[in-house]
Amino acid sequence: MIKGFFIAYLVIAILVTLAALVILFRRGGVYGRFVGILVMCTNVILILVLIGFIDGRRDMYVDISISYAILGFISSVIVAKFLGTSEKSKTESWKEKEEHGN
């Protein structure tokens, strides 16, 4: 009974993840795609944990999910730092151009 619930929830999670993937590629903008990738990372972690519950080896899949979550967090911080500094440098260079009259 409970295994059927996990399987149904896994199928729904996979369908929602695929729908989010389609939306991710159709939407424009760097920030929208960045948020979409973060949502995809969260969905993949959920799918891994559900597979672990269905398979009966929860500890292995939870360890893999935690590792994936740590890598996702570190990469999101790096990308956010890169996006923040590139946006900051653009606004600073624009302000410098305005001050010099160009």
Image (cartoon, rainbow, N blue to C red):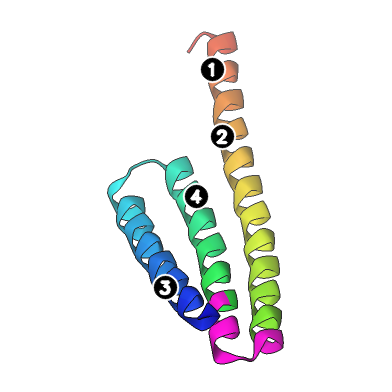
Q: In front here: 102 or 56?
A: 56
Q: Residue at x 48, y 74 (%)?
A: 5
Q: Which residue is mark 4?
A: 34
Check if mark 3's residue and mark 1's residue have beta carbons within 8 Å: no
Check if mark 3's residue and mark 2's residue have beta carbons within 8 Å: no
Badge 3 or badge 2: first in the primary sequence: 3
Picture coordinates of residue 11, whole percent (x, y)? 39, 72
In magenta, the rendered stretch is 50-60
Mark 2 belongs to which amino acid? Glu
Badge 4 or badge 1: first in the primary sequence: 4
Picture coordinates of residue 82, whole percent (x, y)? 61, 48
Q: CA distance from mark 3 to mark 1?
A: 58 Å
Give the secondary structure at mark 3: helix
Badge 1 or badge 2: first in the primary sequence: 2
Residue 32: name its quadrant. top left
Q: Which residue is mark 1?
A: 97
Q: Which residue is mark 3?
A: 8
Taking the image as shown, residue 62 lies to the left or right of residue 86, namely right
Q: Is residue 65 magenta?
A: no
Mark 3 belongs to which amino acid? Ala
